[in-house]
Image: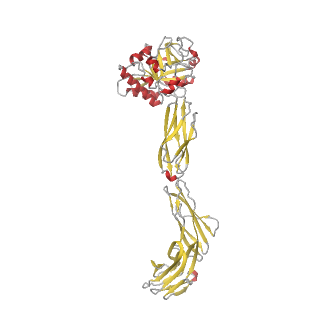
Amino acid sequence: MPSGHASIVAGLAFLLVVGMAPAASAARLTPVPRASSPTADAGATMLEGIDVSHWQGTINWTKVAAAGKKFAIIKATDGQVQSDGKLYIDPMYATNHAQAKAAGLWTGAYHYARPSTNAGDAIAEADHFASVMNLGAGDLIPALDLEDTGGMSISALQTWVTRFLDEVTLKIGVRPMIYTSPSFWKNKMGDTRKLADAGYTVLWIAHWNVAAPTVPAENWGGHGWTFWQYTSDGSVSGITGRVDLDRFNGLDLTPVAYSVFKLAATIPGAVKQGRSAAASVTIKRINFTSDVALDVSGLPAGTTGTFNENPSADAGSVLTVTTPADPAATPVGTYPLTITGTSSGITRTTTLNLVIADGIAPTVSVPTTGLFTGKTLGSTTVPVRVRWAATDPSGIAKVSLQRSVAGGAWSNVGLSSATATYSNQLFSVGKFFRQRVRATDRFANTSGWSQGPSVRASITQQTSTAVTWSGSWHTASTSLASGGSLRYATAAGASATFQFTGSSVAWVAARGTSRGSAWVYVDGVYAATISLRATTTTYRSIVFARNWSAVGAHTIKIVVAGNAGHPRVDVDAFARLAFQ
């Protein structure tokens, strides 16, 4: 039995060590020929080791290693409840574990069981053991030391042991080894082979002072013994007093190492629709050298995931996630992915949240140029408004506008805000202006340029033959008027009609306290009643505007309403736009 329990005979010792996959264990742990006696030349086929606890006191592990010992199985925990209500931890475990490993020995941990019929006892002891063992590189699979039945029947004890082992397996990811004597297993565990058949194939047998150990449970389900505690009365340099001596049935301890791998995965930010991104998948290996096959599940419809490699070293792989060529096929959202690694009968998983972000560029309309009211006509310029619309599910972050004059280079046009939807500009009369616009959304997706037609502005004075008059109209000359003069009428029903071809038209007039109202008809249909009355006199005001989506022939007619006390209506000029 493990050291530190004097007066207990070998027939009552039992240790379980969990951690290997059944198939792998069966292949790796085929017994080699036994030594003819405990003192025979075991070094040819076996490795020597010890098992210890705090009863050995301070150990000089350098001397132990120099004495030819290759492994040490160390007591970690005990099922005994202490005065503080907590389960026991061997006070020398951490020190022995670290120093033995530093001296070059393989190390293992065991738990001394205190079976009880109390509900949850097996699980509590297993969880306690798993939380303390702290296994890593250079460690063997852990062990259960079962020397006390707790007064249980054979079937009850079998159930307790099974629950303990299964819980440890769940917590650390490997199956344990069993330390027992032949008589204990036969008499207290019913000589069952169910645990060996269930994958707990590593047996640490305690059978002292014999040439070869007797193996219970039908030669442990055909697997034979793996570790043999052949005496409790050993002497080893570096240890004061007696110590248990053990042998490993082979020359390579790696098949019974605590051998696991763990996965972790990260991805830098969101993946845009229609794009690819690389997630880093890390494989952390502990005594594990086999290739790991990686797979991913949970990808949204149409999205693919490929790994660049399935590495055998303690390194990482890159998972490239690619969304469909049609970005709209994968909706924006968060998709939980499961990355699975399999190797040597071991399966590990890790999760990763894949965030699909907007990858679709904004939709931007063709910019349109039109005339509008509230501005003043220049002597050689016409105020216009360039409009557009930009939409995106993620929102617009920035709009850029450029224009070309007379077929020249594109130049940037300043906007009132980053997300403006129009630009007020002055067009020089007779020149062609072309606008183009693009937008960027909040995920930095930028649309292509949306380009409008070439647009030319012109001014038609009231003196033009394109304007016809009805009723009594008068001419007034003033440098404040467009072209230096304007016409006005005061009689109700007097009218001015302008025939033109274009895409926009505007009536230009003066406003003031003596001005009245007029009815405006466009293409023979009433459009609006415009009041020119204002507290301050202003000239060249654009008082009415109409825009169309195509160039065409149109008429605009101004009819004086004849307001009492302020009947005057001016016609100064007409502005119009036409695009190619």
Q: Is residue 124 left or right of residue 576?
A: left
Residue drawn where x is 57% and y is 59% of the image: 448
Please name whichever residue, 365 or 28, is drawn nearer the observer in this view of the structure. 28
Figure quadrant of residue 7: top left
Is residue 20 in sight in this rendering? no
- Give percent across and percent down for residue 206: 47, 16
Please name whichever residue, 506 or 288, is drawn nearer the observer in this view of the structure. 288
Please name whichever residue, 276 or 496, is drawn nearer the observer in this view of the structure. 276
Label tally: 0
Figure quadrant of residue 78: top left
Q: Is residue 530 left or right of residue 433?
A: left
Vertical arrangement, residue 366 with respect to residue 107, above or below: below
Vertical arrangement, residue 394 with respect to residue 454, above or below: above
Question: Which colour style is shown?
Answer: secondary structure
Is residue 482 in sight in this rendering? yes
- Give percent across and percent down for residue 119: 35, 27
- Give percent across and percent down for residue 293: 54, 36
Q: Is residue 81 left or right of residue 228?
A: left
Of all residues, the one furthest to the right in this rendering is 408
- Give percent across and percent down for residue 446: 56, 57
- The quarter of the rendered structure image containing the C terminus is bottom right
Vertical arrangement, residue 133 with respect to residue 36, above or below: below
